[in-house]
Amino acid sequence: METFFVEPGRVEAEALTLVGDEHRHLVRVLRAAPGDRIAVVDGAGGAYDATITAISKQDVRCRIEERHPRRNELPVSVTIAPALLKNPGRFEVIVEKATELGVGRIVPLRTERVVGSTAKVERWAGIALAAMKQCGRCVLPAVESPVDFRHFLRNVPPGALRLIPHEQAGLPMSVALKGHAGQDIVICTGPEGGFTEAEIAVAAEAGFIPVRLGDRRLRAETAAVTALGAAMLAVS
């Protein structure tokens, strides 16, 4: 069953209303009709089984049949802070896969070795929305504007397990994750050239644990997805 997005403000006690792109897709592409059943998510933790009751030129009205709070969501908050990449398409892969893997927050970083990157926050948010619907999540990750690496380190929420993959680290990430059930996780990943030694040192001072993802050198986007996959398996 295809999943549709409803703005939280358009969800009522027993009904919800789809507008905009969701309305157009239902009406013009799927030729939906009253009585059809659809799955709907609101991006704020609500998932709904719904039945279409009325279709107009502006909206699609649905009756809520069943609610599924936080369906398919992780039990903890996971933040990924990946460095911006020279190839924008590869950064978009991180946004898409991070959403599929359950992150709640994506914070692009400007680090010392970031080269020629451009911020496309609106596009990234659209990619996250599409990925949320595709994978069956009901929380839309917050995709933030890029920030300086050191600024991010100063503003990490207290109490989170802080990890920073680095090719020279000796501690396997799987080991670092043990014994932290129920704890929020924050992961920083570097650009194509990796973090500098100075950046790793500053991150360690801020409580980040350098971790190893394996023996092979990974592309920046692969490292981000691999780290998130390991975190997801550890907390699921």
Image: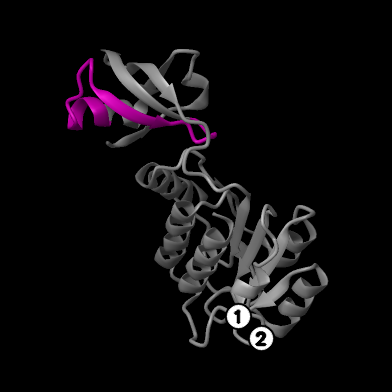
Disc 1 to disc 2: CB gap under 8 Å: yes
- Does residue 62 appear to the left or right of 125 in the view shown? left
In-front residue for pair 179/57: 179
In-front residue for pair 194/79: 79
Question: Can residue 215 be spotted in the picture?
Answer: yes
Write down the residue under mark 1: 212
In the rendering, at what x and y percent does residue 54 appear? 28, 11
Placement of 213 over or under 67, stated as above or below: below
Question: Can residue 86 be spotted in the picture?
Answer: no
Which of the two discs, 1 and 2, labels the residue nearer the N terminus? Answer: 2
Is 91 contained in the magenta span? no
Residues at marks 1 and 2, CA–CA distance in whole angstroms: 6 Å
The C terminus appears in which quarter of the rendering? bottom right
In-front residue for pair 132/197: 132
Q: Which residues are magenta?
A: 25-46
SS at badge 1: loop
- Does residue 35 appear to the left or right of 58 in the view shown? left
Write down the residue under mark 2: 170
In the rendering, at what x and y percent does residue 112 appear? 66, 76
Placement of 50 over or under 145, stated as above or below: above
Is 32 contained in the magenta span? yes
Return the residue found at the far right. Answer: 205
Q: Which colour assignment does the render follow?
A: one colour
Residue in the image at 79% along x and 60% along y: 154
